Image (cartoon, coloured by chain):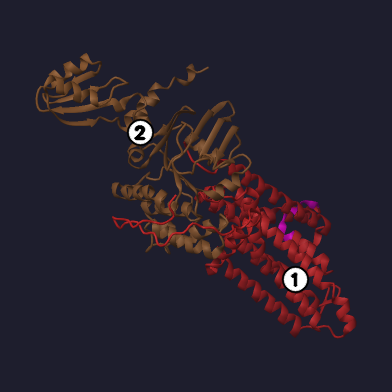
Chain colours: A brown, B red
Amino acid sequence: MTEGASLPAGSPPLIGMLGLTKRYGNIVAIDRLDARVDGKIIGLLGPNGAGKSTLLKALLGLIPYEGGARVLGLEARTHGADIRDRVGYMPEQEAFLAGMSAVELCTYAGELSGLPRTEAMQRAHAALYYAGLEEKRYQPIDGYSTGMKQRVKLAQALVHDPEILFLDEPTNGLDPRSRDEMLELIAELPARRGCAIVLSTHLLPDVERVCDHAVIMHQGRVRFVGSIDELRGARGRDTEILVEVKADAARLGEVLTEAGATCQVVSAVTLSVSLPETATNELVFRRAREAGLQIRGLGVRRETVEAAFLRVIGDAPKKDAQP
Amino acid sequence: MSTTPPVSPAGTIHDLGYKRYVGTRRSAGTRWLVIARNQISSSWKTWWRYKSSLALAVIVTFIAGGVMFILSDKVIRDFAGAAATTMSDAALPKSIQWYTRAAFLVSLTIGARVVAGDLQSGAFTFYFSRSVRPRDYVIGKLGGMFALMAPINLAGPLLLACARLGLSQDVDQLIGSLMLVPKAIAIGLLGTLVFATVPVAFSALIANGRYAIALWGAYYLVFGFIVSMIGRHSDSWIGALDLATSLDAVALQLFDLHLFTGRAGNLDPTVALASILVHIAAAIAIVGYQVRSAHGSGVGGAS
């Protein structure tokens, strides 16, 4: 459903799902997911209980499921271990070993992922350095602050050189500055480490800031898969523009309404315009010229990810009403 | 995909010469070795967790070896006054219970926390989000415990058996004593297996290290004492549920020592051996089942 942004043409998608279903007894946690997901930083969005973590577990090959789930072209059911060697996972909850320092933990993580000890140690230092823990890496993790622990979790997920990183709520519990730093680290990863990222979060500003693609889940179903631009423009919202004129915005509104646009006067010199689906910005310039009005500025009025998310979730039918 | 890291304009991200790893990876079937090695190295870090008990085992070996050497000709008589055995022959079997005590200390400081500590700290997520299978984890943890217990339970008796061979007066006596070596290995292996598995099973039952230690300690000391007393007074098999008494009974039988038998005196060695083997098998099954159960729910947290 999306274009491949990080893999060469002809490569399998980062993640492919076909009728992916997971039931816990009578409860359907994820329900017939069909999606082909690509991108550099993919936001996995959904309210609590949407099935995000269940989906991550299925993709890591940790739980049995019905249907198909492929990661990097490998079926998770049969190649879970191979997938986990190529995927880094940063869990939401604490997942440390008591008494270990950051460098010991990351070295151990690298070895468990199959790296030789020397290589694991070198990469542990590099990953911790990347995560900004260069001075503290020999101290026991038990004494770390929340922000430092988040950085260790990121480093341990990176240490074995994964092709995809699954990050589960990586900015949870962080103060604004640490959150900025964590998002900067995440945003830089595809270019610096050549890996794609699946960012599972409920913090939509984080997604808006770093993600280029999004998967929205609600009530165990996928409601949207595509680029952030497609998400914002999913109902033609990219055609909503804000026009600034020298004077008489109302007059411009009249002529554009005659041309089929929907207009709303914001102020004497500002007009919000929703163009017909087939029209382009050229229509605004042409009609303004014909009416003798001078345009001083024109910008696309974009929907926020938050608004788009709420729209997608709001559009979703109630689960009870589904067949 | 670019593999050349650009320079961060903000200067806040440090990335020194990153290169994609192109070498071979350790095969999935050998990941348990990494877990076992980590188990050993983390136990070796502090003196009180392992080194102190190892030191106790070394001291026991020196004392028993010294007794063998210095009092080699001293005859021990039974209550009727008849010669029953020599100090050099009795030193090895009587030292077994001291090795058992040292091993019990290690089981308290390490064994009973092995799985419980990981459950408590969320380490299952750490392990199972990688290509570690439940059996790798179980084999790694039990293998690590075996490697820690073997120098205490196995090496000491083996050294004493060798020392006893060295004290032989002639070749005939040496040949006659050769069976001491496999017997020492057998009882050493049995003790090692008990303390490498049973405490770990208790640690797998409770996701809290302290409670797991308390439960194991209560089972071994309190429950063991009660059942051995009941077994002694009722002359029944129930005393075999006490692991310490059972190990002692098997050791005394192996080395054919029938003096100063204590609580083990009334216990049938065959029943004792069966109890030990059942404990070991049940412990491995419990650890395997608990780890497998936790495996599926160990990653992800709430959605």
| Residue type indicated by callout 1 | Lys
Considering the numbered disc 2 on the image, is that residue within a helix, a strand or a loop?
Answer: helix
Q: Which residue is mark 2?
A: A229
Residue A256 within the magenta-colored segment of the rendering: no
Instruction: Answer whether residue A45 is visible to the viewer in this image.
Output: no
Q: Residue furthest top?
A: A258
| Residue type indicated by callout 2 | Asp
Report the magenta residues as a range: B236-245
> In this picture, is A195 found above or below A54?
below
Q: Residue furthest right?
A: B172
- Identify the image quadrant of residue B15: bottom left
Magenta stretch, overall SS: helix
Residues A61 and B216: in front is: A61
| Residue depicted at x 33% and y 41% | A209
Residues B5 and B108: in front is: B5
Q: Which residue is mark 1?
A: B94
Residues A175 and B222: in front is: A175
Instruction: Answer whether residue A236 is visible to the viewer in this image.
Output: yes
